[in-house]
Image (spheres, coloured by chain):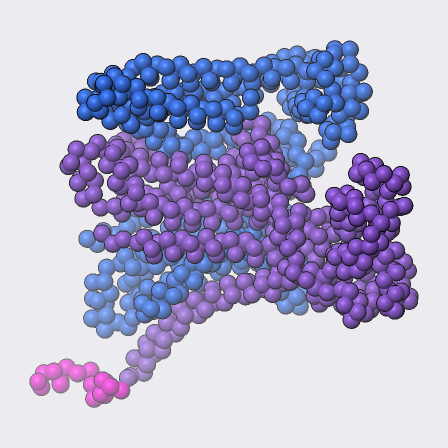
Amino acid sequence: MPVHILCLILLAIGLAGYFLGRRRALQVAGGNAKLLHSLPAYHGWHVALMATVPALLLLALWLIVQPIYLENRVTGHLPPEMAATPADVSLAMSDIRRLAAGLETAVDAGVLTEEEVRDPAADPAALAATLKPLGVALGTTPTPQVLAAAREYRTTAARLSVARAAAVLAVALIGLIAALRMARVDLWARNRVERAVLGLLILASSVAILTTIGIVWSMLSESLRFFQHYPMADFFFGLTWSPNFKGGSELGFLPLLWGTMYITVIALAVAVPLGLYAAIYLAEYADPRLRAWIKPMIEVIAGIPTVVYGLFALITVGPFLRDYFAQPLGLGNSGSSVLNAGIVIGILNVPFISSLADDIINAVPQSLRDGSLGLGATRSETIRKVVLPAALPGIMGAVLMAASRAIGETMIVVMGAGAAAKLSLNPLEAMTTMTVKIVGQLTGDTDFAAPETLVAFALGMTLFAITLALNVLAVWIVRKYREQYE
Amino acid sequence: MTDLAANAPAGGRASRSLLVPSARMRRRNSAERRFRSYGLIAIVVSLLSLAVMLSTIFRDGASSFWQARLEFPVTLDAAVLDPKGNADPAEMAKQTTVTYGKLLDQSFAAILAAGGIDASGLTDKEIGAMVSKAAPAQIRDRVLADPSLLGQTITVDVLAAGRIDGYLKGRVTRETAARDRNVSPAQLDLADRLVGAGLLAERWNWDFITGPDASDTRPESAGLGVALIGSVYMMLLVLVMCVPVGVAASIYLEEFAPKNGWTDLIEVNIANLAAVPSIVFGILGLAVFINFLQLPQSSSLVGALVISLMTLPTIIIATRSAVRAVPPSVRDAALGIGASKMQAVFHHVLPLAMPGILTGTILGLATALGETAPLLLIGMVAFVTNYPDAPPEGFLDPATALPVQVYNWASRSDPAFIERSNGAIIVLLVFLLAMNVSAILLRRKFERRW
């Protein structure tokens, strides 16, 4: 039974439970709701929750465990030469899954009968030929072992699916009946429902923690696998990046780090002056009516998807830089360049810096300005010598956060910076970044056993660590140096 | 007084009026003006780059909503299309697009001859190449859907080839055509004559919005349909998965959470997740949802899961500020007349915070709609020409998303796809604008000062 139908049935059971529970509560109170400790609706909720929540939890658990169990069971039947390394196993498993899905399609389409699929003497080549017109493309003709495993996979999956539906529905019905039997005048249904709701709220707020665990776990485990294939020192201190799926790749991280940092520095060189001056003007000079117009307009910059900036870099800024700077100056003839990506990321980060700096400047108390102006300083002198020093920690924090965003930016560098990993000082040359390589190594046909694919996880881990460190540092600077004016 | 006069510094500064600025004061004042103008310049530069970007996109993209189409009569020869003569669709389906292509070419050549349009110097193949490669399939589908058309002469309205369209839009010129393998200047001359005869014209192109993507050789028929459906599916799923969880988490953290280590841990996690680069969520999706849980690649379900996790911090932050904005007096009043804490929150605080939550949700969804990088990693960049099925099964079918389609087209070699890419951005921006405007209107309508 498909999962969504199971969910719909659970929903229906819950709904029925609500009405049954309410009626039952009124029944035990002899129709007089005032005798009940909790309102009848809470009795309804009580039954509905008791029926659906344990069943849903069971279903979620089952959905996570079933693939693991299935895989273990099927790989147990594989001959040892096909299960020599984890890579072989995952390759065989994807064949088996594809074949099993193909058999399922064939049975659904009526091309094969259940008996024909189960027939152990069936010829794999003939089977593959039958499946082909159905759009089931098998890479090679399956070996008898794979066919047997696929049959095993299919029957086990079907059996598990029935067992899943049965178990979930049984739990739901047991919950429903148990809750109905609990109905009494003095049942504290409201308190029980509220405790359950509180539990759900806590569960929801723990999703954030689960996500972080998921991120760290997924990247750490794959990174460790990568470092089994490729020495850690060569990755972190290698000066050459030349992945080759045939083997003999050099996966040095430093050229990528250099490209990332170069682009980030250029982006900050664009974003910090523009953002900071814009914030100063808006906070200190602009009259409120102008400010009410300009501030949202600057924030529009941040609301436009990055892929739009990527296209802008690709077809407008890049060719412009090439035609008017790179070629006349003899510095190269590539449309994608570090400068191109840096400038566009810089523009994207202007509203980020300006709105943060605006808040920080506004938080500097007016008395400091008044004191400075009263001593005869001009407004710009007040800003430069009094307001900005007072706001400096906050502005540093904003700059660090902008740097972390620039480092993690993907679409603009993918479309504007190029793909060649180089250690060069020329800003008009194409270079590449960590994020570009993550996208590059993980899109298209990927083999999750090859170091050339796994390196993306190590890059992701490094990226995550760098951006996290920058953000923590930013928060720490802001906390540590924040002047307490009150 | 004499003391004061005696203490006045030498050099005549005291004798000057305050109304006449000294050289030093003039310098300070001009520094002031300079400083102020830097601020103005910074704002102008930022807004100007935004304006340049948007105007290039509209300039290059607006034309993708119009497409060159050819309109001419075609006689559907029953002897060719249905050799057995029994009008059985299964039999007729054996005639491939090649047959229809030949028929179309013949009809087109016949029209040129009948209309006295000079096509000398062009081979039959070149004349046939004026019509899009997508046209035969279009006619075939029409005939298979309605076999009674056999033998009739119908007027077909088919796409012209991409280069011809480019010529009418000014992208292809005679100079570029001379260097182009796919089009010749003579074909452009013929296009001019066809326009003169009223057979060829640029017309509004719904297929750009509703049609599926097309391969590299047929830019003229590439459309956004699959990407739009994928984006809509994803936003629906994000709404269903992310908003309840986000609102529940915010209510817990604002109203119930005790001050302890667990709560602090949650808070730190939310703050950090909001700053994690989006591509990292793509890696998470690839490792957990695709490799571990074996969910289908390129499906809108996986895309929505990844985007939900990414959007969750945004929604939590917006919801928390909306919940915090409800004054404590509301809670106190509810508690005072005997409501439980849960009742006070769900019956009073939450409804009052709803407009703020809604606004935050719409803005969060608008950001989510434009997200591209994580979707590349979970395979949504694939070339998909089949529309996904209706939900719920359709959530597992391969799909693309609007911003990914922008990237996909931008990375193809034919310049006609750059126009499409810009056009897709226009569609994307229209959606974002609609969402943002509705958020602003909602805020205006329900804004409450306590």
Whether B17 is drawn above or below B205: the answer is below
Q: Quadrant of the N terminus of chain B?
A: bottom left
In the image, B320 versus A280, the foreground residue is B320
The residue lying at 66 percent from left, 34 percent from top is A446
Work out whether residue A186 can be spotted: yes
Report if residue A349 is visible in the image: no
- Quick check: A114 above or below B12? above
Query: Disc count in the image?
Result: 0
Q: In the image, what residue occupies the spot 32% across and 77% down? A: B29
Query: In the figure, is residue B225 to the left or right of A175?
Result: right
Which residue lies at the image location 25% right of the left edge and 40% below the top edge? B348
Looking at the image, residue B237 sits to the left or right of residue B143; the answer is left
Viewed as shown, does residue A5 lie left or right of B207? Answer: left
Segment tinted magenta in the rendering = B1-20
| Main SS, magenta residues | loop
- Along the line of sight, the residue nearer the viewer: B54 or A107: A107
Q: Colour of chain B?
A: purple
Q: Nearer the viewer, residue A436 or B298?
A: B298
Q: Is residue A205 left or right of residue A3?
A: left
Q: Is residue B180 magenta?
A: no
Q: Position of residue A475 (x, y in %)?
A: 35, 45
Residue A330 point in image, percent of width and height: 67, 64
Q: Position of residue A42 (x, y in %)?
A: 28, 26
Q: Colour of chain A?
A: blue
Image coordinates for residue A207, horizontal then vertical, percent: 41, 32
Report the residue at 76% width, 18% height from top.
Answer: A143
